[in-house]
Amino acid sequence: MSHSSPERYKEHILRHEFQILDHRVTLMDRRAVSIGKLNCSDVYMGSLQSLQAGSPPERVAVKMIRGQSLTDSEIKKFLKELHTWSKLRNEHILPLRGVTVELYGTLSIISPWMANGSARKYVINGSVDPGPLLDDVARGLHYLHTEIPVFHGDLKGENIIISHDGRALLADFGYSVLVWSSFSLSISEPTGGTPLWTAPEKITDYTDSTASDVYSFGMLALELFTRQDPFYPELLGPEDIVNGKRPRRPTPKVTLERLTDDWWKICELCWVDADKRPTMRHIMEFRAGHVS
């Protein structure tokens, strides 16, 4: 596992006034756990020591950033988005506890441990209906887009964490900076990674927006209902998406008959041209009017 020098992060960490958790985080297991197949970090179970005397430590997820050829501007942007995440307060957003640079000599992102893992992992259990999880995601995105406003930028099943009581929480803000810094080097290559969830306009100009999040929400819905990557089993390159390629409707058998006409309509509306896509409020209102 390759990591970046902590010195590259320290200046920006101090500038953004993060909650620095050095000397308070220990790893409970030296082996990485499989919450999601992240392209840019390794996840460990850890323990966060409380500052209050007598309070027990908190079990946390420790995401260590892998070594990459990041420029200073990319590091700055990534930490700026993490700082925004740290200030978010909403029941549909995974809290960010803080950061540390003392573990394995790299930047580590600390958040509460959720044993249910990612939404992608959670829906593998066929008894789980993705609909309520997607309703949670819609509420979280609506909060981001209207109350802050900010964009998520990398919406997919691996970046949705399931709480202890089965609610979906948005996580991993800023990770698109890491993913796209590598992806841009091979944009013409067929890929099964994040670009399959990405709006065509973002593939060409790398710019996040409410509309690009909405597009990704449609891909997330398809992913969770099928328990497969978007477009599966086709192997696509980003140029196919830019040129208008969109998924075909899966069979009822594949989706366990849960992808209703209403949900498919939402997916299709999310994939139209950017200026014609609904807002998350519109999607929430549509769902409220069609939930029995």
Image: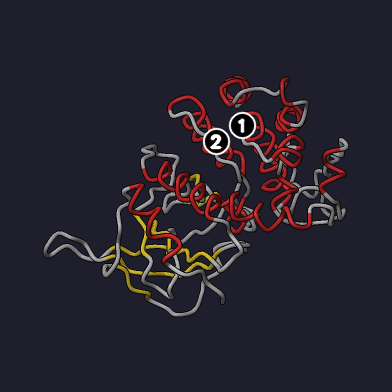
Sequence-wise, the earlier of marks 1 and 2 is 2
Q: Residue furthest bottom?
A: 30
- Is 251 left, or right, of 226 in this rendering? right
Q: Quadrant of the C terminus?
A: top right
Q: Look at the image and tell me whether residue 164 can be seen.
A: yes
Coordinates of residue 220 in the picture (x, y in percent): 66, 43
Question: Is disc 1 placed on a helix, strand or loop?
Answer: loop
Where's residue 95, x and y in %? 38, 48
Q: Nearer the viewer, residue 77 or 71?
A: 71
Disc 2 secondary structure class: loop
Residue 99 picture quarter: bottom left
Relative to 49, 191 lies left or right = right
Asked if residue 63 lies left or right of residue 159, the reply is: left
Query: Pointers 1 and 2 in contact (CB under 8 A)?
Result: yes
Look at the image and tell me whether residue 292 can be seen. Answer: no
In the rendered image, the vertical position of residue 5 relative to residue 97, given as above or below: below
Q: Is 147 located above or below residue 121 in the figure? A: above
Residue at 43% across, 26% down: 147
Residue type indicated by callout 2? Phe
Residue positioned most to the left: 53
- Which residue is tagged 1? 209
Quadrant of the image occupied by residue 197: top right
Instruction: Give the residue displayed 38% in from the left and 51% down from the top.
Output: 96
Which label belongs to residue 151? 2
Which quadrant, please, contains the N terminus? bottom right
Query: How far from the left and from the top, in percent, is residue 260?
Result: 73, 34
What amino acid type should be assigned to the residue bearing mark 1? Ser
The x and y percentages for residue 254 are: 79, 50
For the point 43% across and 73% down, which residue is it? 105
Q: Nearer the viewer, residue 167 or 137?
A: 137
